[in-house]
Image: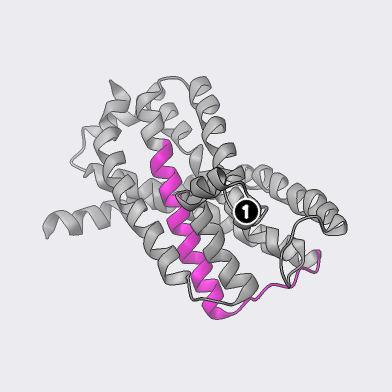
């Protein structure tokens, strides 16, 4: 019981420290906001005119907004391992690891911080979607649901990035592997087109892709309003996030080896 309480307390401290860095230098949020704005403003608008992708009773901009939000959160989280490599190179990580702080708290702290960054990206995307007059279902329930899914999704991909950082020893290699992982996951999901129009082998990949469950949950919350599959989406994200946090905590000390 004492270990659990200490882990939760230390996680909050680590997350607060990471968020403080963001508040002191918010330029990263501004630069990362460019990509989703371009996806919505150019790619989304262009395909809305073509109407080549079946999206049911919704416009393509409505359909793609949850996908672009997911993409933005994933891109923020997956490169979180860069900070781990930077901390190792500067000696900060070695100092943290010799403290009595539970390794799981170090991982959860970074996961929470990535979730906060993801929520900041969500606010930017929603504001831009409002400017483009994208009709989204914004209620208190949908807002709470978005917060939960963004936090879980950001946490999962942060944990994945920390595992990569434990294996890869240079920032250049990490960047390359990060791109190799994120782009296939993005295109092998339901972010920019329905799973139904994919070839059969890609449908199988999409159904085991955590990113698909993020998109599905967000789309249910802010577009369709059909929440039948939402509990399953959140449950799957919570399970995979928990297990990857345990694996990340196990791998984390290996960063300094």
Q: Main secondary structure of the magenta part?
A: helix
Q: Nearer the viewer, residue 74 or 99?
A: 74
- Point out residue 154 in the picture as x, y percentages from the top left corner: 47, 51
Q: Quadrant of the N terminus?
A: bottom left
- Point out residue 75 in the picture as x, y percentages from the top left corner: 57, 43
> Among all residues in the image, which is located at the extreme left?
1
Residue under pointer 1: 191
Q: Nearer the viewer, residue 136 or 121?
A: 136
> Among all residues in the image, which is located at the extreme front?
200
Q: Quadrant of the C terminus?
A: top left
- Badge 1 marks a residue whose secondary structure is loop
Answer with the quarter of the image where residue 163 lies: top left
Name the side, left or right, on which 103 lies relative to 225: left
Q: Is residue 20 magenta?
A: no
- Point out residue 219 in the picture as x, y percentages from the top left corner: 60, 66
Answer with the quarter of the image where residue 256 lies: top left
**Residue at 74% across / 61% down in the picture?**
54
Q: Nearer the viewer, residue 34 or 197?
A: 197
- Point out residue 158 in the picture as x, y percentages from the top left corner: 43, 44
**Residue at 36% across / 25% down in the picture?**
167
Name the side, left or right, on which 167 lies relative to 157: left
**Residue at 48% across / 76% down in the picture?**
228
In this view, 147 is above or below 139: above
Name the side, left or right, on which 79 lies relative to 256: right
Name the side, left or right, on which 9 lies relative to 14: left
Asked which colour scheme the image uses, the reply is one colour
Task: State whether residue 139 appears in this view.
Answer: yes
In this view, 126 is above or below 112: below
Task: State whether residue 14 appears in this view.
Answer: no
The magenta segment: 132-161
**Residue at 70% across / 44% down in the picture?**
35
């Amino acid at each position: 019981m004492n270990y659990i309480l200490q882990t939760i307390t230390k996680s909050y401290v680590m997350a607060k420290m990471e968020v403080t860095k963001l508040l002191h230098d918010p330029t990263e949020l501004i630069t990362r906001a460019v990509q989703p704005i371009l996806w919505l403003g150019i790619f989304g608008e262009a395909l809305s005119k073509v109407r080549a992708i079946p999206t049911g009773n919704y416009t393509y901009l409505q359909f793609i907004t949850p996908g672009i939000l997911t993409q933005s959160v994933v891109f923020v989280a997956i490169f979180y391992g860069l900070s781990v490599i930077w901390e190792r190179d500067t000696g900060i990580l070695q100092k943290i690891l010799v403290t009595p702080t539970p390794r799981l708290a170090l991982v959860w702290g970074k996961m929470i911080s990535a979730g906060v960054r993801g929520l900041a990206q969500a606010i930017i995307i929603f504001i831009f979607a409002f400017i483009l007059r994208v009709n989204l279902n914004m209620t208190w329930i949908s807002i709470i649901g978005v917060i939960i899914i963004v936090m879980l999704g950001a946490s999962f991909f942060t944990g994945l990035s920390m595992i990569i950082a434990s294996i890869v020893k240079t920032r250049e290699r990490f960047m390359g592997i990060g791109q190799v992982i994120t782009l296939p996951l993005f295109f092998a999901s339901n972010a920019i087109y329905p799973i139904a129009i994919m070839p059969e082998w890609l449908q199988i990949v999409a159904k085991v892709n955590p990113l698909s469950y993020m998109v599905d949950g967000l789309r249910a919350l802010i577009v369709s309003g059909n929440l039948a599959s939402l509990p399953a989406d959140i449950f799957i994200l919570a399970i995979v996030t928990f297990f990857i946090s345990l694996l990340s905590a196990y791998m984390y000390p290996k960063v300094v080896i």
